[in-house]
Amino acid sequence: MDSQLEQLRAASLAEIAAAGDEGAVETVRVKYLGRSGSISGLSEAMKTVSKEDKPRLGKLLNETRNAVTAALDERKTALAAAADALAFADVDVTLPGTAPQLGSLHPITQLQDRAIQIFRRMGFALADGPDIEDEWHCFDALNTPADHPARNEQDTFYLPDGRLLRTHTSTVQIRTMEKAAPPVRIIAPGAAYRRDEIDATHLAQFTQMEGLYVDEGVSVADLKGTLEFFFRELFGSDAKFRFRPHFFPFTEPSFEVDIKAGAFGGGERWLEIAGCGMVDPAVFEQVNGRRRDTAYDPEKYTGFAFGFGLDRLAMIMSGVPDIRAFTDNDQRFLAQF
Ligand code: PHE
């Protein structure tokens, strides 16, 4: 039996070494260690050996089985490693990986967030209103009569039921005053829509930010101070402004705000950046009518309102010559902000 074991050991180890893949290794395992394998057969034969020989032969049998088992495991591991090495033969694992591309907030969103932060510090709360409006909130309540050009079908997107896409965020002035009695101090960023021919300075949908402050004793000085503070926070403390008389149906007096282009390295030109004015008493009366009270008593309260286009601001701040760049979604453009 000694020599039989020796033979089996030598033969099995040789076969294991010669096994070329996992399947071949398994065949060798079954042949020697399987239920009816040769080494298992010898274990059966142990029952018949003499008492004196049993301990020695038992030990030898165990050693043989252990040696074959170890050789099988080793061969399997070696074959798997070789297969891995082959699979990665063409891969240079020392090359840098592919970095994930991080996105960022849209430049208009970034500017809007900054603007909100600045107005928050002056006590302005965020307000909101629907993009689809009725004519009353968009025009009538804002003292814009039926024959006003802004109401022309050619200038506005009307829905079949007579509602329209708001042409400005001034609608939120009205919606805010309908809900809350004075004092109110809000800003309302959001989309506005006009039936403009799309070109380098016009989009059919753009982004505005509206402001409204109504309280006792609010004056043009407060309006000027608030807007100048805001724009200086954005453009730097040396920025120069001009308030030019203008006309809006819902404010009286009304102004347009110009900034010296020098604030963006643009020299001595004046650039228009906002519309504003003192809330027209006729607007308060419209709101009172809806509220069925006299909360906005024009004898007691005054207020100012302003509105500006965030797209236009972003264009002049960043020297973007074409407003369409903000909606083209070209990564090469957006990644610069
Ligand atoms: N709604 C005006 C516009 O879109 C801007 C504005 C807002 C003017 C508030 C005065 C007061 O042009």
Image (cartoon, helix red, strand yellow):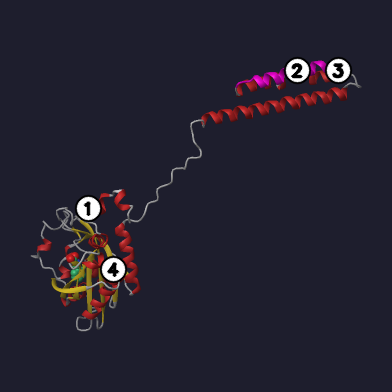
Between the residue at mark 3 and the residue at mark 2, the CA separation in whole angstroms equals: 19 Å
Image marks 2 and 1: residues in contact by CB distance under 8 Å = no
Magenta residue span: 2-20
216 shown above or below 331:
below
Crowding at dot 2, Cα within 10 Å, few <14 / some 14-19 / many 20+, comes out as some
Label ID, residue 324? 1
In what element is the residue under mark 2?
helix
Crowding at dot 4, Cα within 10 Å, few <14 / some 14-19 / many 20+, comes out as some
Q: Is residue 5 left or right of residue 169?
A: right
Name the residue beneath numbered marker 3.
48
Residue 83: x %, y % from top left:
56, 28
In what element is the residue under mark 4?
helix
Label ID, residue 161? none
Name the residue beneath numbered marker 2.
8
Label ID, residue 235? 4
Query: Looking at the picture, which amino acid does disc 4 mark?
Result: Phe
Secondary structure, magenta segment, majority class: helix
Q: Does the magenta stretch include residue 135?
A: no
Between the residue at mark 2 and the residue at mark 4, the CA separation in whole angstroms equals: 90 Å
Find ligand 1 in the image and state its quadrant: bottom left
Crowding at dot 3, Cα within 10 Å, few <14 / some 14-19 / many 20+, comes out as few
Crowding at dot 1, Cα within 10 Å, few <14 / some 14-19 / many 20+, comes out as some
Residue 2: x %, y % from top left:
83, 18
120 shown above or below 23:
below
Q: Is residue 125 left or right of residue 35?
A: left
Earlier residue among tags 1 and 4: 4
Q: Quadrant of the N terminus?
A: top right
Viewer-side residue, 180 vs 100: 100
Q: Quadrant of residue 146?
A: bottom left
Between the residue at mark 1 and the residue at mark 4, the CA separation in whole angstroms equals: 23 Å
Residue 136, visible in the rendered structure: no
